[in-house]
Image (spheres, grey):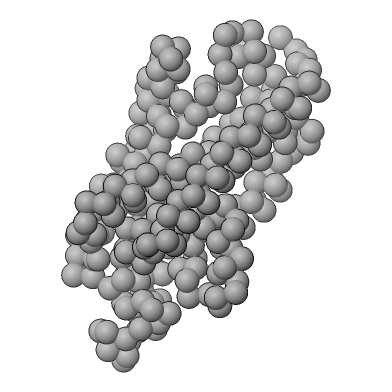
């Protein structure tokens, strides 16, 4: 573990060089959130403070989007997939292969270090934004809810990483994987609950999505925190999420194993 802790510390040092960039990215990242909240406030206008749209009041809808922003700051990959693809394309993974180091754990250490710094910087504007909208916030009161939200959040981070890692490994076969990354991002943005809460969809479609990995990246942790999922549905969701995390790990290992067989480094 010592070598991965060392990689983690190096990752923090490298990330701190760009802390101002992270701050600007976090601040400008609030612009789409602001637009989304204004849109929903317009939709709810004239319906009264307790009006429901898909079982959501205005306050719970605002809380949902603030939570999604928070979860995204904690779990989303930044440029990890592009960096992994560059490592393969440029032959930089040869340096890792020559050392007693697991590439997946190496990249995971860098991912965690990057998320820690970005989250620390990004939480400043997000918390100020939440403070401004404090009258609309729906905060969990039970310790169990907070703990299960934390467990789901950690699994969401692992799942996010394994998906990005697996897509990036397609660089063993394809020279430019940008198309795959953008397609994956499009599916994720819609099916993970970024665009709208998934439980306002038709029940049949929401049920189908429940068995894909995407709702467990953002929507499911947010639903736990807001108390919108409980009882058997909660435990079933956690079981499905953990199953997808395990599947993601197996897929990442399998794709790496097949890809490394056809890998050949050129140059110095």
Look at the picture and state if 134 lies above or below 172: below
x then y, percent, for residue 122: 33, 45
With 23 as the anchor, is 95 left or right in this view? right
Depicted 158 relative to depicted 133: above or below: above
Which is nearer the eye, 254 or 30? 254
Q: Could you tell me which quadrant the N terminus lies in? A: top left
Residue 156 pos. (x, y %): 46, 46
Asked whether residue 40 is in view, the answer is: yes
**Which of these two is toward me, 206 or 6?**
206
Q: Is residue 89 above or below residue 163?
A: above
Q: Residue furthest front?
A: 232
At a point 56% along the width and 39% down the height, the residue shown is: 246
For the C terminus, which image quadrant? top right
Residue at the spot 25% in from the left edge and 84% down from the top edge: 49
Residue 200 versus residue 172: which sits nearer the camera? 200
Give how far across and how far down residue 184 sits, in percent.
Answer: 64, 51
Q: Position of residue 106 (x, y in %)?
A: 52, 22
Residue lying furthest bottom: 46
Report if residue 160 is visible in the image: no
| 151, above or below 268, in the image | below
Which residue is located at x 56 percent, y 46 percent?
244
User: Image point 24% across, 59% down: which residue?
Assistant: 140
Judge from the rendering whether residue 243 lies leftward or rightward of residue 56; answer left or right: right
- Number of disc labels: 0
């Amino acid at each position: 573990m010592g070598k991965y802790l060392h990689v983690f510390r190096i990752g923090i040092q490298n990330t701190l060089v760009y802390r101002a960039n992270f701050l600007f990215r976090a601040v400008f990242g609030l612009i789409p959130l602001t637009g989304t909240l204004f849109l929903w406030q317009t939709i709810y206008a004239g319906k009264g403070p307790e009006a429901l749209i898909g079982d959501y009041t205005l306050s719970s809808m605002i809380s949902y989007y603030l939570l999604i922003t928070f979860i995204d700051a904690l779990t989303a990959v930044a440029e990890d997939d592009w960096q992994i693809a560059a490592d393969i394309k440029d032959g930089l993974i040869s340096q890792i292969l020559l050392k007693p180091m697991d590439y997946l754990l190496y990249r995971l250490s860098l991912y965690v270090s990057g998320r820690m710094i970005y989250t620390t910087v990004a939480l400043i504007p997000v918390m100020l934004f939440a403070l401004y909208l404090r009258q609309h916030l729906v905060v969990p009161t039970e310790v169990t809810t907070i703990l299960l939200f934390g467990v789901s959040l950690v699994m969401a981070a692992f799942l996010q990483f394994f998906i990005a890692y697996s897509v990036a490994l397609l660089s063993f076969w394809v020279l430019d994987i940008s198309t795959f990354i953008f397609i994956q991002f499009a599916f994720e943005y819609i099916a993970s609950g970024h665009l709208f809460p998934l439980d306002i969809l038709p029940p049949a479609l929401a049920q189908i999505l429940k068995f894909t990995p995407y709702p467990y990246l953002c929507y499911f942790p947010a639903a736990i925190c807001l108390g919108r999922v409980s009882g058997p549905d909660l435990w079933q969701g956690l079981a499905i999420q953990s199953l997808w995390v395990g599947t993601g790990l197996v897929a990442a290992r399998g794709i790496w194993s097949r890809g490394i067989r056809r890998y050949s480094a050129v140059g110095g």
